Amino acid sequence: MKDKDVAQILRDKGLRVTPQRIAIYECLAGTTAHPTAETVYQQLHSKYPSMSLNTVYKTLLVLEAAGLIQRFTTADSVFRYDANPAEHVHAVCLKCGRVSDVPGDFGEELERLRAKAVGNSDYNIRYSTLLVYGLCPECKR
């Protein structure tokens, strides 16, 4: 993904374009590892030494509010970030904590579960995510 493409994506969402926002979004869009804010910060700090961890957190909140990324937490109670904002299934390794997208089209099933949760709850439900837990291929060996 080129800076110009990311800049246009940000503009299309009505966001101000900054080098930090471009870098953070590109970092998330370029990985399937579902990093934490701290991981994003560590990956970008050498290239952007003046960028603080607080800037990373604030930018992630802005990107999430704009619908460009999703935030979720696993059993480790740490927020993870995903540049795929569509509702989909994540697999979490119980041993090493790795998070992976589960391939497949679960759209209709997830929508039915969310609709049922909305109907059975007094919460103002905004989004949902499904986490499944097990052992990743490496830990399974």
Image (spheres, rainbow, N blue to C red):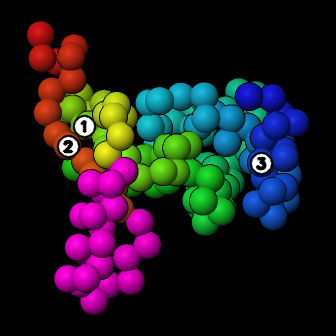
Residue matched to label 2: 132
Which percent across, then down, holds residue 46?
71, 27
Which percent across, then down, holds residue 116?
23, 73
Q: Residue at x 61, y 66 (%)?
A: 65
Other-residue count near label 3 (Cα within 10 Å), few / some / many at <14 / 14–19 / ≥20: some
Q: Amino acid at mark 2?
A: Val
Mark 2 and mark 1 residues within 8 Å of each other at the beta carbon: yes
Is 111 placed above or below 138 here? below
Q: Is residue 14 visible?
A: yes
Other-residue count near label 1 (Cα within 10 Å), few / some / many at <14 / 14–19 / ≥20: many
Q: Residue at x 36, y 51 (%)?
A: 107
Distance CA(mark 2)–CA(mark 1): 6 Å
In the displayed structure image, the side of residue 26 where residue 60 appears, left or right: left
Which percent across, then down, holds residue 111?
33, 61
**First-in-chain label (3 vs 2):** 3
Q: Amino acid at mark 3?
A: Ile
As drawn, the residue found furthest toward the bottom would be: 122
Which percent across, then down, holds residue 21?
75, 47
Q: Which mark is residue 92?
A: 1
Q: Amino acid at mark 1?
A: Val
Distance CA(mark 1)–CA(mark 3): 29 Å
In the displayed structure image, the side of residue 50 where residue 107 appears, left or right: left
Q: Quadrant of the C terminus?
A: top left
Q: Nearer the viewer, residue 59 or 125?
A: 125
**What is the chief secondary structure element of the magenta stretch?**
helix
Q: Residue at x 26, y 37 (%)?
A: 91
Residue matched to label 3: 9
Q: Is residue 58 visible?
A: no
Q: Residue at x 25, y 47 (%)?
A: 131
